Amino acid sequence: MENGQDTAKKPRRGIYLLPNLFTTAALFAGFYAILAAVNGKFETASVAIFVAMLLDGFVSVAGIAGGYFFNVIVQGGTPGAYLASFSLLAQTADLTVAVLKAGVFGLIAAMVAVYFGFYAKGGPKGVGDAVNKAVVVTFMLVFFANFIMTALYFAIVPQKFG
């Protein structure tokens, strides 16, 4: 400290925005998949689900890169120490399950939207009600599916402990 001021280099805030942008894009791809499925564009919905899965993978990569940046650049750690601690705790199965979950969540959203879309009655108001129901049911099913898939993952895949 010189003259009562911290001379440490402040990190740029833009790096923290990158994972959030990928997550938001994946969210929009999922919503677009729902809208495409409700409108009967099933091929487009399946492509949107695949895009959401790819973006989920990018989020994981951006998170790892952000951790590296923070540890090595901001905190002054060594790259070797970061990679050693990361490889000690992380597994390839973690990324695989994250991408699998993204696909399952997109599939759930598309199937629920298709179901409620097919049985919507009452004109525009009925379609609006069907969309609201589809969003609520999708949220509940995704929450439940995430719980089940995570519990199964922890039960089947042995976890690394440093």
Image: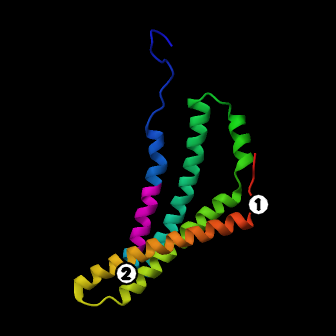
**Residue 31 part of the magenta-drawn span:** yes
Disc number at residue 21?
none
Please, what is the three-letter code of the amino acid marked with disc 2? Val
Q: Within the image, what quadrant is residue 78 found in?
A: top right
Taking depth in this image into account, of 148 and 104 the one nearest to the observer is 148
Residue occupied by mark 2:
38
* Horizontal side of residue 42 vs 96, given as left or right: left
What is the x, y in percent for residue 129?
29, 81
**Residue at the image point whose x is 48% and y is 18% from the top:** 6
Q: How many marks?
A: 2
Q: In the picture shown, does residue 20 fall above or below 37?
A: above
The Cα–Cα distance between marks 2 and 1, rounded to whole angstroms, is 40 Å
Q: Choose mark 2 or mark 1, whichever is in front.
A: 1
Label 1: which residue?
Answer: 158
Q: Quadrant of the C terminus?
A: top right
Query: Is residue 29 covered in magenta?
Result: yes
21 is higher (above) or lower (below) than 112: above
Residue 130, compared with residue 4, is above or below; it is below
* Start-end of magenta stretch: 23-34
Q: Is residue 33 above or below residue 57?
A: below
Q: Is residue 47 left or right of residue 67?
A: left
